[in-house]
Image: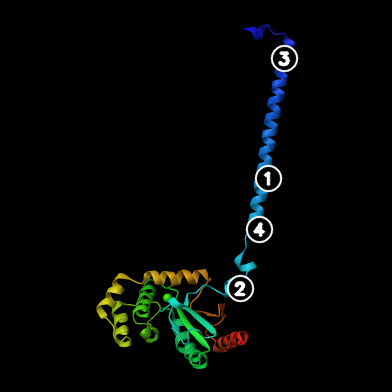
Amino acid sequence: MSNKKKPKNHYEQEKVTRRKQRQIVVISTALVIILLVAIIGIVLKTQQSSQPNENQNNPSSQETPSINYKEQPIMGTANAPVKLVEFGDYRCPYCKEFEQRIVPKIKKDFIDNGKVSFTFINYTILGKGSQLAANAAEMIYHQYPDSFWNFHKALYAAQGDEKKEWVTKDLLTSIAKKTVPSLDEKNYKQTLDDLSYQNNVIQDYNLAKSMKVEVVPSLFIDGKLVNNPLDYDVVKEAINHSLKQGD
Ligand code: CA
């Protein structure tokens, strides 16, 4: 009640002062918020532009992919100066062509004399049959490494019509029986039933993805993608180029 007795001008003055104070508080708060937003914006922008783009800033990252060769089948001398890696799918006709027409030439010219090692990695992009075939191949590689390349070759030789699902457990078993002398057939069949090596198949697939593999077959020579792996002249030139660089 005492307020009512205050002189009118004093009351009004106080009111104006309080209003001004409130305005100052609102304006400074707004300024602080604007400033903070601007600072956060600048910081985020700086962070984004300073984040390395691996492909642009570090071209060698694409050329030296992290392939753990110890976990993949290797044809030839493991410490050969030049490393070839094929990403393939047992259901892919071009992979069969690469296996039958190009690989024997590479073997004769470069693998048998210790200049090149050759690694096959699964890139299963053609459905369930591809995965089953890759599981069989992974099983043979892990349990019977000495028989792997014979099995691999025979599997490509047995390739059927691309439009049909020709990969069956029976076919895979008959190929293994012909190419793996000490095969434990029961265990092998169980492996196919359980897809026991699916993790290895997925690891291969993820590796291919990380290396931006788009097609099968894809051939890498010392980590560099070869444009046309079905042209032996191109492959040979690329291998010779890598061999010269290593001198
Ligand atoms: Ca593999």
Which amino acid type corresponds to the residue marked 1 in the rendered image? Ala
- Would residue 49 be visible to someone looking at this image? yes
Q: Toward which corner of the image does residue 241 lie, by quadrant?
A: bottom right
Query: Quadrant location of ligand 1?
Result: bottom left
In this figure, which residue is indicated by the disc labeled 1? 38
Which amino acid type corresponds to the residue marked 2 in the rendered image? Ser
| Whole-percent x, y for residue 151 in the image | 36, 84
Q: Residues within 10 Å of mark 1 (few under 14, many from 20)?
A: few
Residue 49: mark? 4
Q: Are marks 1 and 4 in contact (CB under 8 Å)?
A: no
In this figure, which residue is indicated by the disc labeled 3? 12
Labels 3 and 4: the sequence-earlier one: 3
Q: Nearer the viewer, mark 3 or mark 2?
A: 2
Taking the spot 64% from the left edge, 55% from the top edge, the residue there is 47
Taking the spot 68% from the left edge, 45% from the top edge, the residue there is 38
Secondary structure at badge 2 equals: helix
| Whole-percent x, y for residue 160 in the image | 37, 82
Image quadrant where one finds the N terminus: top right
Q: Nearer the viewer, residue 243 or 20?
A: 243
Q: Is residue 169 left or right of residue 234?
A: left
